[in-house]
Image (spheres, helix red, strand yellow):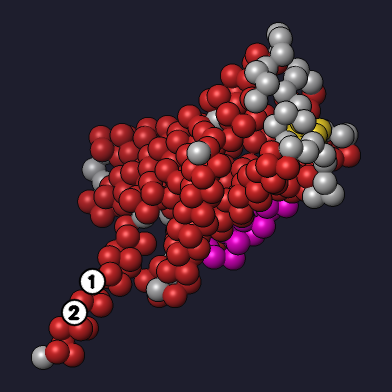
Amino acid sequence: MVYSFRYFDGWMVIILSTLFLLIIIVDKTCHTVPMMLIGNSCLTTLVYGCCLLSLCTFTLKNDLKKIQYQDSLCILRGYLVYSSYAALNYSFLLQSLYRYMTVIYPNRLFFQSLRFQCLLICMTRIFVLIYSIAFIFNNGFIYNVDNQICFPALQFSFLSIYGSLCTYIIPVPMIMFFYFKLVRYVHEMGKRVTPTNILFRAKRELKMIRRTIILLSVLAISGFPYTIFIIISFFTTPPKYDYRIAFIFFDVAMILVMITLFQFTDPLKASIIKRINLRPNTVAVGIT
């Protein structure tokens, strides 16, 4: 039952993220810098979903055969899951940074340009790939027999603190910083005589950052069981199937992220609705 749910959830994430990416690529109305950043999040989600599905397949195969062994791809799977999850957090950070720059520094067009945003995307991807390599060189990805997974051990260590710093402590507070700075900026603009169009744009970007925080909150809530297990590991031994429990929550979070991303991205939602409504109209014209 659990495996059926995880497979269904994993395939739904892959299908939705692929669909969103194709629409962003095909629809010219989505060819903007903000939508490119949304596409970056969709692509990261697609990679993360594929990694989770591969992880689930390996675990299921070993459970059915009642074998316990570390195959040649075990560490690679753990590495890709770990780094792609971090990349998803940083993709949300880039969205917040862009919204912040467009309001606070509207005249610095280079920071809002496609070239600069592509550079930031490349830098964040290189960063998450490099920082995760430290776990490989320090034997950080350990095969857990009970959970059939290669992942950093839940224990109080430098690698645990280092991983939490790079995955959560850097991107999440920075997103919150951009949000509160923008809230304060919009509040001060409301007190001054500000052109209506500028104030409207600032409020719109503030709304988009607020939506990004909601997306991030979904991920943060999903990581709560994993965080609890880490804290437990500082004092005693975590539950036997800690990773299995934690990854069920991660699976649920990813489908919620895709649904929320669709609901919050107006150009994407408009494009999909337009294509859904186009077919009945075309048939009606043909009959007439």
Residue toward you, 85 or 255: 255
- Say if 11 sits above or below 210 in the image: below
Q: Which range is magenta?
A: 112-126
Percent from the top left, x then y, of residue 190? 26, 38
For the residue pair 178 and 287, the one nearer the viewer reads as: 287
In the rendered image, the residue lying farthest to the front is 65
Left or right of residue 259: residue 60: right
Identified by mark 2, the residue type is Asn
Left or right side of 268 for 283: left
* 118 displayed left or right of 184: right
Q: Is residue 42 visible?
A: no
Mark 2 vs mark 1, CA separation in Å: 7 Å
Q: What residue is shown with label 1?
A: 277
At mark 1, the secondary structure is: helix
Instruction: Say which residue appears at 55% left-offset and 42% top-offset.
Output: 3
Q: Residue at x 61, y 54 (%)?
A: 50
User: Tags 2 and 1 in contact by the CB under 8 Å rule?
Assistant: yes
Residue topped by disc 2: 281
